[in-house]
Image (cartoon, rainbow, N blue to C red):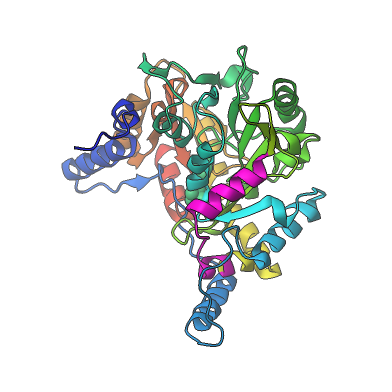
Amino acid sequence: MIEVNNNFHLLPVSYLFSEVGRRVAAFREANPEREVIRMDIGDVTRPLFPSVIAAMHEAVEELASSSHFHGYGPEQGYAFLRDAIAEHDYHNRGIAIDSEDIFVSDGAKSDIGNLGDIYSRECKVAVMNPAYPVYVDDSVIDGRAGVLKDGKWSRLIYLDCDPENNFLPSLPEEKADVIFLCFPNNPTGEAISRPELKKWVDYARENGSLIIFDSAYEAFVRNPDIVRSIYEIEGAKEVAIEIRSFSKTAGFTGLRCGYTVVPRELKGTYKDGTQVALNSLWNRRQTTKFNGASYVAQKGAAAVYTPEGMADVRKATDYYLANAALIRQTLISKGYKAFGGENSPYVWATADNGEDSWNLFGKLLEEYGFSTTPGSGFGSKGDGYIRLTGFNSRENTEKAMSKIK
Ligand SMILES: *Cc1c(COP(=O)(O)O)cnc(C)c1O
């Protein structure tokens, strides 16, 4: 039999979401008369925008016509979309990122994992604790995490986030080669200011590190002092890759489209010391292993940058933000400590009495009839916390919060 990638053997079975589902189902069965509201939902619920739907209908008609048919597109994405991204997400915000720096993909999650192809297996990886689980699991699969001991991987550097540091981690004491940062953060919902992010850019410049900046939630930022793109920080183009997605911004979780920015200024070295632009490595990787995002999805994504599309992004994110604000205020008024939920759809909460995440999850489910995500599933520093999201409907969010009130 074939010898398989042993790193999968190291990977513990992720039971977080299945266990939440199992416990919710058990509660429903035991309490058929009670309604359960899902406040743990990690997916958008509003439909795609009319402008996106219209653009995709048009694209489908083109594919149905022999004179307008499109086959394989550019692996990097169509120019119409890369240009729209550069103009609206960067140039119009005073950031000099060009189409050549932008690679369109089928979403952020795949790019986060695929980027592991272009940095060395030897790289020491730093992750926030708690964090979106993909950064850790990809590092394990690629053989960069070492072994699991007492809930921590021996070769990963953990950047602890707690109320004492406002969920903004301190710079690592040992040298980190690759640093995953996510702001506005999933799961804590906390965002980062320019002076705080500048510390990381400076660290990366001094230490020759690469920052992979996940800004999947940038469209939820309302405060002008909060970072939307790492390239707002001077010098970031030489040290950072930025990952973006239309998923949470424009409801593309099922449709699939995102993009990754690899500025041409960002350089690395081969073993023999020869310098190389990461942009050309990523281009080589994508042209070899990827055949581009679907034409229909890219046409839909381009419509997000029309005036109607941009107004709809604002409306949809405002809707989820209002839900998050209601959740945060309600929890605080009932004596919980609640964080995030201001430039982010996520609220991170604790009873602050030593109660662990699963207990808190069980208590809220039994007493008030809503489900949450236990924070311990996002890393050891998540224990004692639960994550609630603004992604349910207004009606359901109000209903859940009125129960706790
Ligand atoms: C949802 C999410 C993603 C994944 O986005 P897709 O484009 O749908 O793959 C990436 N990063 C974070 C932090 C997320 O929460």
> In the picture, residue 28 is in which quadrant?
top left
Q: Is residue 268 magenta?
A: no
In this view, the residue in front, 132 or 328, is 132
Residue 52 placement (x, y as % from top left) = 56, 70
> Measuring 50% from the left and 32% from the top, which residue is drawn there?
348
In the rendered view, tell whether residue 277 sits above or below residue 120. Answer: below
Which quadrant is home to the C terminus? Answer: top left
Visible residue check, residue 327: no
Visible residue check, residue 135: yes
Helix, strand or loop: magenta stretch: helix
Could you tell whether 47 is left or right of 31 in the image?
right
> Measuring 76% from the left and 33% from the top, which residue is drawn there?
194
Which quadrant is home to the N terminus? Answer: top left
> In the picture, residue 3 is in which quadrant?
top left
Residue 156 placement (x, y as % from top left) = 49, 20
In the rendered view, tell whether residue 391 sits above or below residue 144. Answer: below
> Measuring 75% from the left and 54% from the top, which residue is drawn there?
98
Could you tell whether 192 is left or right of 65 in the image?
right
Q: What stretch is highlighted in magenta?
A: 277-299
